[in-house]
Amino acid sequence: MNRVLIRNGHIIDPANNVDLVGDVFITDGKIAKVGGNHTENADHVIDATYLTVTPGLIDMHVHLREPGFEHKETIATGTAAASGGGFTSVVCMANTSPVTDSPDRIKRIYEIANSKSVQLNSVTANVFPVGSITKNLAGEELTDIRSMLSAGAVGVSDDGVTVMNSALMCEALKLSAEFDFPVMVHCEEHNLNAGAVMNLGETSRKLNLVGSPNAAEDIIVARDIMLAELTGGHVHILHVSTAGAVELVRWGKQRGVNVTAEACPHHWILTDTEVEKQGTNAKMHPPLRTQRDVDAVLEGLCDGTIDAIATDHAPHTPSEKALGMKDAPNGIIGLETCIPLVITYLVETGHLTLNEAIAKLTNIPAKIVGLDRGTLSIGAVADITIIDTQKTAKVDIDKSYSKSRNTPFDGWQLKGWSVMTFQKGIQNKRTPTDGTNKG
Ligand code: DOR
């Protein structure tokens, strides 16, 4: 029997309303005891005095790029970045090549994630794939969603593009009502944001760049909430960025619609003025918006309208990002900066308690995608994150575990970092700033 004792930590387990100082005892990869002081013999003892012990964090929105775009990221490097950043589970999107749009391709992601080369590379994070809503992300024909669910898909998403055909969305949501899985939607009306490379506003006019209006996002958010109401399906709104989207999700919840939502750190910290300073490292879809939108997203996080925090970790290589605002791909990496951004900009500022923030990274995303993770319940898999909420350090992106370097947060001084994780009771000592990938 392998016994691990994490001693004297500040244990926060929102799923069980646990917030106390004490020990966590792990036997054979499962949570055996939480709280109190343990005298049992352990093979391995970790002193967590002054540290915060939480269920392993879950990022419900990442792009691991494998198969097909291994020059940007692989499942090995992406999960290394995840565990370095304090995440023990990631949900990966379907815009791989080939697109993850069949049961075999779902199985393939699990095979790679569980393969020796990935496991040897690291104590990896758990990988849970979503399948696409439409074949080849083309928006024309529904995938075989039921078979993908049987193969282990935790939801469906065409993330990166919007399913513009409302009838198809309706079909996907009908299936969701029947088989209970989230339809995770990227909300941008393609005709309205055609050619857009940033938010439409003062900065886009100043830089003479094509901008996307908030309405492009709001229209699809409204449509998909209405379709969820019509069908009884579960719609999950990915990366909320506008004040209107927050208002619409709030409205949907008030009406009793099965709608959940997530927001990414960049959308509640940065505005579109960042594009002027950071260029393509501030280019993503949906784009950075205005202060009014940032404030609304923060309010949505505070009042529970926005259920979860996710990163939309979207690796792209330096040469791709060097193509300039018009041609560079959308997205930024986020796995290693998420926790310190949450603690510095949500917890230290008083927007959320540490408990509320941890819930948005553990039991809430677990519930949305139906995972038996994100909890320290007795008998649960011992996925654990240990955070030093007082540690202050600078983001040094050259030390990232990711293959890519595209972040607007490089050099930022942040407080509150993951110091280690456990996956199935096995310790991983990576921290976000000690990677060795050269990009
Ligand atoms: O900025 C983005 N990048 N948004 C998305 O929805 C997709 C992602 C990517 O795959 O690069």
Image (tube, rainbow, N blue to C red):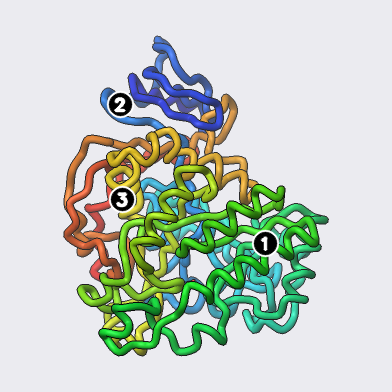
Distance between the alpha carbons at the discs numbered 1 and 3: 29 Å
Q: Are marks 2 and 1 in contact (CB under 8 Å)?
A: no
| Residue 80 seen in render | no
User: Residue 4, relative to residue 369: is it above or below?
Assistant: above
Q: Quadrant of the C terminus?
A: bottom left
Residue, disc 1: 225
- First of labels 1, 3 by sequence position: 1
Q: Residue furthest right?
A: 178
Callout 2, which amino acid?
Answer: Ala
249 on left or right of 35:
right
Q: What's the residue at 66%, 73% (across, down)?
A: 101
Residue 225 placement: quadrant: bottom right
Residue, disc 2: 48
| Residue 266 seen in render | yes
Q: Nearer the viewer, mark 1 or mark 3?
A: 1
Q: Nearer the viewer, residue 154 or 43?
A: 154
- First of labels 2, 1 by sequence position: 2
Q: Nearer the viewer, residue 257 or 57?
A: 257
Q: What's the residue at 33%, 62% (across, down)?
A: 291
User: Residue 157, relative to residue 140: is it above or below?
Assistant: above
Q: What's the residue at 50%, 31% (across, down)?
A: 14
User: Residue 87, relative to residue 412: is it above or below?
Assistant: above
- Mark number displayed over residue 239: none
User: Residue 303, relative to residue 149: is it above or below?
Assistant: above
Mark 2 closeness class: few <14, some 14–19, many ≥20 residues within 10 Å: many
Residue, disc 3: 341
Callout 1, which amino acid?
Answer: Ile
- Asked whether mark 1 and ligand 1 are closer than 8 Å, the reply comes as no
Mark 3 element type: helix
Q: Nearer the viewer, mark 2 or mark 1?
A: 1
Q: Position of residue 215 (x, y in %)?
A: 52, 74
Callout 3, which amino acid?
Answer: Leu
